[in-house]
Image (cartoon, grey):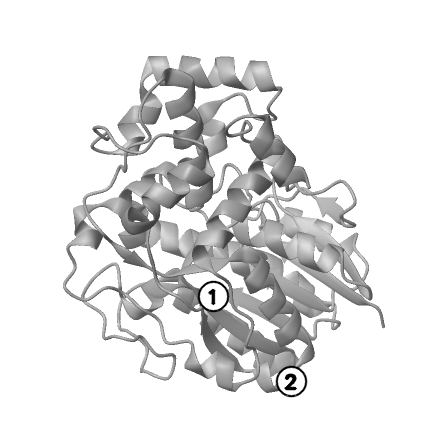
Amino acid sequence: MINHLLVVGASGVIGTGAIERFGSHDGWRVTGLSRRPPIVADDCRFDMVATDLTDPQDCRAAIAALPPVTHMIYAAVKEARGLVSGWRDDELMAENGRMFANILDPVVETGSLRHLSLLQGAKAYGAHRHPVSTPAKEDRPRDDHPNFYWLHADHARRRAAETGFALTIFRPQVLLGSAPGAAMNPVTALGAYAALCHEMGLPFAYPGAGPALWEFVDTGLLAEAFVWAAQDTGAHGQTYNITNGDAFVLQHAWPDLAAALSLTDGGRSPRSLAPFFEQPETILAWQQLSARHGLRIPNLATLLGESHHYLDLLLSARIAEKAVPVLLSTIKIRQAGFTPCRDSFLSLVHWLDRLVALRILPPFGGPERSERRES
């Protein structure tokens, strides 16, 4: 049987990375499922289905029209405006649980599903509610708090016990990728901020409260882990943290980032990025920038999704002033045999350049830098 991968949430930051990785991998047929198609390279091979995950009949009709699905990545999520309030919203959690069941159940009932990759994150450890032990490890008891992660995992395990498909759960940290309009992609928000600073004659000032310590995960790296988990039976039935493998402080890297984007570091920064992006002069500057460079997404709010709120959270005093940052142990996945890693600064610059290449962001700097990027 041919391997047929269904990527649910195909236009998000995780889904886009998975589409690009599997779409260039021999031996896979790839179908993306989301309300809108992902923006990927022209030579990426995949089919696309537009489906409303809140409508169970729509989901059943979509699956019935597809060839048998052997593998599935579920990377869809519904977030509240502004993000953080939704992380404690019981009804939003329940809706995310229903969305997952609406699409998993008809896939399972075809009898063809062999492996499911399911996404969680640091909130599985209660990082949004209380201090977390460092490093956070996968073998600790489930943190007792309401979370749609548990709705997803419990439903998936019940269906797996009934039909025998394998399940691997991934817990990435802060994701870096190319998807515009995503709920949590700091690359888009950082890139838009950099482009607007240049357009509006503003200094590229660090917009954070202090030196917050982060762990990134490149969505290309995460997609490699999806390939590995689909093919290595040792990964089946397991939960894995995953990061690039290094630690990253954006404030420390800011001068290098400014230099990489041919911008001038320094000056007074906005107190937060969300109000900056909502100012009429900022919106007008983006429209002018978009028209001049022929960008794909002329509407700034559409480009950002909720990612500017996410970046504000990452840069906030709430994160920067934590006595103990949230760090994930990646020993388990390394010992299981998945050892690739990424340099986080180079990963960040790569994805900024990728957004330029896809005409989502305008070119940074002069023609010399554009020539280097294209070479």
Residue furthest out toward the right? 1
Measured as percent of width and height from the top left, residue 71 is found at 69, 67
Is the residue marked by circle 2 packed among few (<14), some (14-19), or many (20+) residues within 10 Å?
few
Measured as percent of width and height from the top left, residue 256 is found at 38, 44
Identify the residue at image location x=30%, y=31%.
Answer: 274
- Residue 100 vertical placement versus 185 (above, below): below
The Cα–Cα distance between marks 2 and 1, rounded to whole angstroms, is 21 Å
Give the residue type that dot 1 points to: His
Give the residue type that dot 2 points to: Thr
Q: Nearer the viewer, residue 330 or 342?
A: 342
Q: Nearer the viewer, residue 359 or 373?
A: 373
Quarter occupied by the C terminus:
top right
Q: Residue under label 1, please give it.
A: 152
Measured as percent of width and height from the top left, residue 81 is found at 35, 37
Q: Residue under label 2, please give it.
A: 233
Side of 320 where 68 appears, left or right: right
Q: Which label sits in the foreground, 2 or 1?
A: 2
